[in-house]
Image (cartoon, grey):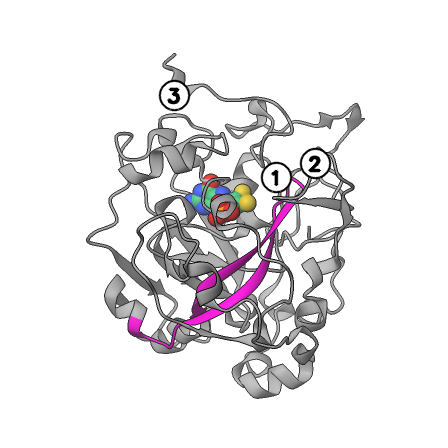
């Protein structure tokens, strides 16, 4: 087997499934505990938040009390770190959205762009940075289709102009137990969804990553996941103002390893919900089967809300390690919904979050 195809099977390595679960088998024991997989009941459309609950942004902001997240615009402005940039990506101007940003020390840019999960390029954290330059990102179009009144194929340049670019500082919490604080640039996904107008049947949104040949994406030679990488959200989650289409990071266009030219960021969910290098957004009446749920349904659920009380079979979710901090320093407690509870908890009112993990 060529070196580049080797899979690091250390359990701490990533959100990769246990290797025998990777190709669709179900593993029922990990860490010595018996895990029984009970198929999750699909949520009924009638249980999904009504359309009127997400249509008015202002009303939503009041309801969610998002001002609790708001911070001043002061110390972390683009200029402060642009000078430190060590790569030549094009600048992407944006205005800081303080109301949707957290006030925490940023993870260093070099960590954000070199410690990545992007299995299309391999399963080691350094593989995406080393190999993602092979991905073709020009030309790039994004098809938005399915249960919409106006299906469209957008050129990436048109998408970049569809709404004002905002810089938002979000936490990213990976299911593997590490976290970062990242200055993403983009805008709320709702702008695009409103542009195509979901039909009354639309209840879910599916996100499909580009699938390019193994010369471009060497990781797809291995059936680690059912390529292309597919993720999904409920429509009300997708319409939430925090759910972001991301085009840039640290004041510049996204590097390929972070999901150029466009990815998703859903800060209250584990990182695997945020698909990278998206080419199709499909509105659906039924819940999409996502790559991780297909690979290991007992380990990964459709919802994947950050929840310190629901352990993953291989990783306790009670604590996390901030990337860039001391490797063996104390771990910090993980917050429910990654700290975005005031803004998003109402989406899950009445739901058993241990069952819908
Ligand atoms: N998207 C694709 N297409 N392929 C992937 O392997 N990994 C996910 C998510 N999106 C992944 C993906 C996981 S597990 C995480 S934690 C985040 O991307 C990591 O994003 P980052 O590398 O920009 O930090």
Residues marked 2 and 1 touching at CB (< 8 Å): yes
Q: Secondary structure at mark 2?
A: loop
- Closest to the observer, 204 or 116: 116
Residue 191 visible from this viewpoint? yes
Question: What's the distance in space between the residues labelled 3 and 1, CA to CA?
Answer: 28 Å
- x, y percent for residue 74: 57, 74
Name the residue tied to disc 2.
37
Q: Tell me whether circle 3 and circle 1 mark residues in contact (CB < 8 Å).
A: no
Residue 249: x and y, percent?
43, 58
Q: Is 217 on the left-hand or right-hand side of 10?
A: left
* Location of residue 154 in the rendering, given as x and y in whole percent from the top left corner: 25, 65
Q: Earlier in the sequence, mark 3 or mark 2?
A: 3
Is residue 85 magenta-colored?
no
Above or below residue 19? Residue 87 is below
At horizontal 64% and vertical 29% (from top left) the residue drawn is 12
Residue beneath disc 3: 4
Of marks 3 and 2, the one in the foreground: 3
> Is the shortest distance between ligand 1 and the CB of mark 1 under 8 Å?
no
What residue is rendered at 59% in x and 35% in y? 296
């Amino acid at each position: 087997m060529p070196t580049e195809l080797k899979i690091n099977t250390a359990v701490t390595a990533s959100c990769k499934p246990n290797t025998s679960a990777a190709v669709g088998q179900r593993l029922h024991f990990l860490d010595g505990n018996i895990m029984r997989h009970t198929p999750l009941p699909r949520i009924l459309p009638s249980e999904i938040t009504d359309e009127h609950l997400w249509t008015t942004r202002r009303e939503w902001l009041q309801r969610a009390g998002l001002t609790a997240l708001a911070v001043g615009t002061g110390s972390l402005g683009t200029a402060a770190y642009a000078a430190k940039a060590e790569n030549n990506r094009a600048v992407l101007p944006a205005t800081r959205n303080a109301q949707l940003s957290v006030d925490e020390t940023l993870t260093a840019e070099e960590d954000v762009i070199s410690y990545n999960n992007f299995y299309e390029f391999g399963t080691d954290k350094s593989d995406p940075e080393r190999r993602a330059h092979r991905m073709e990102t020009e030309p790039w179009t994004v098809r938005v289709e399915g249960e919409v009144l106006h299906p469209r194929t957008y050129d990436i340049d048109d998408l970049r102009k569809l709404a004002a670019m905002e810089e938002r500082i979000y936490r990213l919490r990976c299911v593997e137990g590490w976290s970062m604080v990242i200055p993403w640039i983009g805008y709320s996904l709702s702008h695009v969804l409103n542009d195509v107008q979901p039909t009354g049947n639309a209840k879910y949104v599916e996100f499909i990553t580009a699938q390019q040949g193994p010369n471009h994406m060497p990781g797809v030679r291995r059936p680690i996941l059912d390529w292309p990488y597919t993720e999904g959200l409920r429509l009300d989650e997708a319409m939430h103002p925090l759910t972001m289409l991301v085009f840039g990071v640290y004041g510049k266009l996204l590097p390929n390893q972070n999901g150029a030219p466009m990815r998703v960021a859903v800060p209250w969910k584990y990182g695997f919900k945020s698909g990278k290098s998206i080419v199709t957004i499909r509105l659906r009446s039924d819940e999409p089967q996502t790559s991780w749920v297909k690979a290991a349904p007992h380990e990964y659920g459709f919802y994947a809300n950050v929840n310190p009380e629901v352990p993953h079979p291989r990783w306790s979710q009670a604590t996390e390690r901030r990337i860039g901090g001391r490797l063996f320093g104390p771990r910090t407690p993980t917050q429910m919904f990654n700290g975005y509870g005031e803004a998003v908890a109402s989406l899950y009112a009445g739901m058993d979050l241990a069952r819908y993990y």
